[in-house]
Image (cartoon, rainbow, N blue to C red):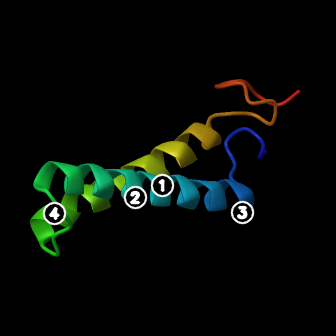
Amino acid sequence: MSNFLTLNWKDILKGFVVAVVAAFLTAVYNAIQNGGLEFTWVFWQPVLITSIGAGIAYLIKNVFTNNEDKILRKDI
């Protein structure tokens, strides 16, 4: 874990993993809703937006979390 208001490479890697998982789940959901995979922008736009949002949200959470996983508290 990184210190309060900082990120390290593990945080960035985990944020990427969160983004990939979010993209996969969104694609599966859209495929179920539409009856299959489509290769159109209308199908993939929500997948892209959701995955970027999830990755950024994870990184923001880690910026404001200290090395003891407490939100908005400085390191001791």
Tell me which numbered mark, 1 or 4, is placed earlier along the sequence.
1
Marks 1 and 3 close (CB-CB < 8 Å): no
Tell me which numbered mark, 1 or 3, is placed earlier along the sequence.
3
Please determine whether, in this image, residue 37 is positioned above or below residue 3.
below
Mark sitting on residue 43:
4
Tell me which numbered mark, 4 or 2, is placed earlier along the sequence.
2
What quarter of the picture does the C terminus occupy? Answer: top right
Q: Residue furthest right?
A: 76
Marks 1 and 2 close (CB-CB < 8 Å): yes
Tell me which numbered mark, 3 or 2, is placed earlier along the sequence.
3
For the point 40% across and 58% down, the residue is 24
| Residue where numbered disc 1 is placed | 21
Measured as percent of width and height from the top left, residue 65 is found at 67, 33
Q: Secondary structure at mark 4?
A: helix
Tell me which numbered mark, 3 or 4, is placed earlier along the sequence.
3
| Residue where numbered disc 2 is placed | 24
Badge 2 local density, few (<14 within 10 Å), some, or many (20+)? some
What quarter of the picture does the N terminus occupy? Answer: top right
